[in-house]
Image (cartoon, rainbow, N blue to C red):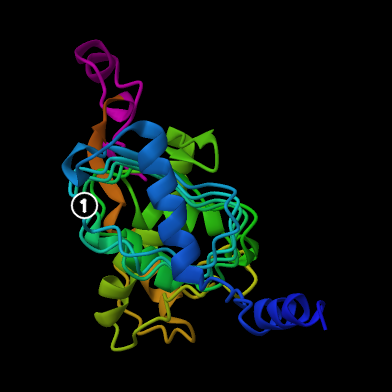
């Protein structure tokens, strides 16, 4: 019976073994933040200016509003789906969120100091919602959105430049003056056309859908029954755009009438009567 106490002791140890519970996503995030604070030697939240949390397999992040002076945040190469954890970090100037699984960026509009934003290699699909969230960032200068589904939309780059005119570097390429001029030609011209077409009691469709293929407008032609001089006919136009075009052509015409001095006889010619009795002629020059 000498073995009985040992047997009972082993049985007791097996019965009291602690079963480890896996950490939740927020617990993993909290541990990553605390580890980073220890590495940097920060003891107060007010001393934290940057956090390096990339490549941590994070699917969620704890609320970071406790770090009031946070300016630089690296969260790239994780598994994030959203960014609701950034709501009160008003001093944040650089945010690296590339290579995640983010499908919406709701909450970014509350970061007015943001200067650099990297969002490439994510799952953003709604270009209108994305632009709406970024419009209020007046200090945003560098933006990357490539390798997102929304980049496949027609005229994606010009559309972003049009709505975010303060951005100077888009998808690692400098925004050029040629692109800005093209943007004005495509978008602002259509808005101005609406105002003009209202005068003809027909509003032309100047809306632009980034998901629709771009169609080049056919060349506008003047109706054959139209004359530039004293036009009194009431030409009916099937397309209001033709009416706008014709009116602009009329307004741009300028006629200059002057005496043709070649037909006016000089004093000697009058004396010699070489020109006969022909009257002087008028010359009209039309400039367009």
Q: Residue at x 61, y 61 (%)?
A: 148
Position of residue 71 measured from the top left corner of the image (x, y, whole percent): 28, 40
- Nearer to me, 279 or 4: 4
Q: Which residue is drawn at 52% across and 70% down?
A: 81
Q: Quadrant of residue 262?
A: top left
Decide whether residue 178 is among the magenta residues.
no
**Side (left or right) of 272 relative to 160:** left
Above or below residue 265? Residue 144 is below
Position of residue 279 measured from the top left corner of the image (x, y, whole percent): 26, 39
- Nearer to me, 185 or 37: 37
Q: Which quarter of the rendered picture does the C terminus lie within?
A: top left
| Residue 259 in view | yes
Q: Which quarter of the rendered picture does the N terminus lie within?
A: bottom right
Above or below residue 43? Residue 200 is below
* Secondary structure at numbered mark 1: loop
Which range of residues does the magenta coloring cover?
262-288
């Amino acid at each position: 019976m000498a073995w009985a106490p040992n047997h009972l002791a082993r049985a007791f140890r097996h019965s009291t073994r602690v079963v480890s519970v896996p950490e939740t996503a927020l617990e993993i995030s909290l541990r990553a933040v605390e580890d980073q604070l220890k590495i940097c030697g920060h003891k107060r939240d007010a001393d934290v200016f940057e956090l390096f949390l990339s490549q941590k397999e994070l699917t969620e992040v704890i609320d970071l509003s406790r770090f009031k002076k946070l300016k630089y945040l690296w969260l790239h190469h994780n598994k994030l789906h959203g960014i609701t954890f950034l709501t009160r970090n008003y001093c944040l100037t650089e945010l690296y969120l590339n290579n995640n699984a983010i499908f919406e960026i709701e909450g970014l509009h509350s970061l007015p100091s943001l200067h650099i934003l990297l969002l490439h290699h994510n799952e953003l699909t709604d270009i209108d919602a994305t632009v709406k969230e970024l419009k209020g960032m007046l200090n945003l200068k560098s933006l990357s959105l490539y390798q997102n589904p929304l980049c496949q939309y027609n005229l994606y780059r010009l559309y972003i430049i049009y709505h975010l005119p303060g951005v100077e570097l888009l998808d690692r390429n400098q925004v050029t003056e040629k692109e800005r001029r093209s943007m004005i030609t495509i978008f602002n011209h259509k808005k101005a056309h609406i105002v003009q077409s209202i005068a003809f009691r027909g509003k032309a469709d100047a809306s632009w859908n980034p998901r629709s293929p771009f169609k080049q407008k056919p060349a506008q032609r003047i109706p054959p029954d139209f004359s530039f001089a004293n036009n009194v006919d009431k030409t009916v136009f099937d397309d209001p755009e033709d009416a706008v075009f014709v009116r602009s052509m009329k307004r741009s015409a300028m006629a200059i009438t002057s005496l043709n001095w070649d037909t006016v006889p000089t004093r000697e010619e009058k004396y010699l009567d070489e020109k006969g009795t022909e009257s002087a002629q008028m010359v009209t020059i039309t400039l367009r």
